[in-house]
């Protein structure tokens, strides 16, 4: 089974190619160019480099958020176009689920396996001094996605061992450590590329019998767009 995955939920972004359970390649996007112009070329170049033709792809995966509204729309539209052209299922994977799967499958900064009692805080940069956040335990989401100031979120974590991951955690690492001290650990790297994990999660859902249609993808925005807020104020 060949999986093509794309993540545009973070400023870094990434794309990945998987064959069966093996990650063939994952690469970061070129942040110096607009996503709309770089994405088709980056995907095509990766497939050519690995000698994979488009018809060989069995399933596609795309990050649904949270993240930049523009980035999500461009990424989802790109993969929807491919899925429709190839008549392949398209799986929408949240950045939170991808981050949590990496955290629970890896190790913290101390190099030892993550103990099952540790809670994993997935933080994605939300700009404006805020982060998109969700909380996981034993691989399962136990607190739904929200957007808030890091200082507010950290007050609910005091006294608990926590493992932080995501570009939001990387951005506010000093704040996290100041509030939680030795109770806070971080994945290595703190902000991993997510496309590979998204592809793995999509393959798992495919094997479970799911076959989502391209038009069924729904972005996970968490925060309402500036346009919506302005419309309500008018």
Image: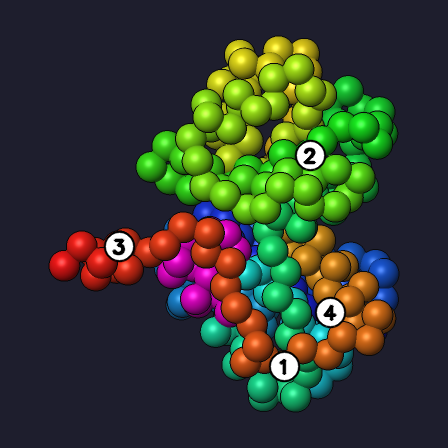
In the foreground, 159 or 49 = 159
Query: Looking at the image, is mark 3 or mark 2 earlier in the sequence?
Result: 2
**Classed neighbour count for the residue bearing mark 1: other residues with Cα under 10 Å, few (<14), some (14–19), many (≥20):** some
Which color scheme is applied? rainbow
Which circle marks residue 132 in the picture?
A: none
Query: Looking at the image, is mark 4 or mark 2 earlier in the sequence?
Result: 4
Asked if residue 192 is among those painted magenta in the image, a careful observer would answer no
Magenta residues, dominant SS class: helix
Q: Is residue 187 above or below residue 221?
A: above
Q: Is residue 103 visible?
A: yes
Q: Is residue 22 above or below residue 211?
A: above
In the foreground, 83 or 232 = 232
Asked if residue 72 is among those painted magenta in the image, a careful observer would answer yes
Image location (x, y in percent) of residue 25: 71, 57
Which residue was labeled with disc 4? 3
Say left or right for 17 vs 22. left
Name the element at disc 3: helix
Looking at the image, do the residues carrying marks 2 and 1 touch, with CB atoms under 8 Å apart? no
Which circle marks residue 120 in the picture?
A: 2
Tag in front: 4 or 3: 3
The residue range painted magenta reads 65-76
Which residue was labeled with disc 3? 229
Q: Is residue 78 above or below residue 187?
A: below
Name the element at disc 4: strand
The span from disc 2 to disc 1 (Cα, nearest Å) is 31 Å
> Which quarter of the rendering shows the N terminus?
bottom right
Which residue was labeled with disc 1? 213
């Amino acid at each position: 089974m060949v999986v093509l995955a794309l993540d545009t939920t973070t400023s870094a972004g990434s794309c990945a190619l998987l064959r069966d359970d093996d990650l063939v390649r994952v690469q970061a996007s070129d942040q110096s160019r607009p996503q709309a112009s770089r994405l088709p070329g980056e995907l095509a170049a990766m497939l050519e480099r690995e000698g994979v033709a488009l018809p060989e792809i069995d399933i596609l995966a795309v990050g649904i958020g949270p993240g930049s509204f523009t980035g999500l729309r461009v990424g989802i539209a790109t993969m929807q176009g491919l899925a429709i052209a190839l008549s392949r299922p398209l799986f929408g994977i949240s950045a939170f689920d991808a981050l949590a799967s990496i955290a629970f499958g890896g190790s913290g900064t101390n190099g030892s396996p993550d103990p099952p009692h540790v809670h994993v805080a997935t933080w994605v940069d939300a700009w404006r001094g805020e982060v998109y956040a969700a909380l996981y335990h034993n691989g399962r989401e136990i607190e739904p996605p929200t957007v808030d100031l890091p200082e507010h979120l950290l007050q609910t974590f005091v006294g608990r061992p926590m493992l932080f991951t995501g570009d939001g955690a990387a951005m506010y690492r000093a704040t996290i450590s100041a509030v939680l001290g030795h109770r806070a650990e971080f994945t290595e790297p703190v902000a991993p590329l997510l496309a590979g994990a998204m592809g793995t999660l999509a393959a798992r859902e495919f094997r479970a019998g799911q076959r989502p249609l391209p038009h069924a993808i729904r972005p996970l925005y968490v925060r309402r767009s500036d346009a919506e807020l302005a419309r309500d104020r008018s």
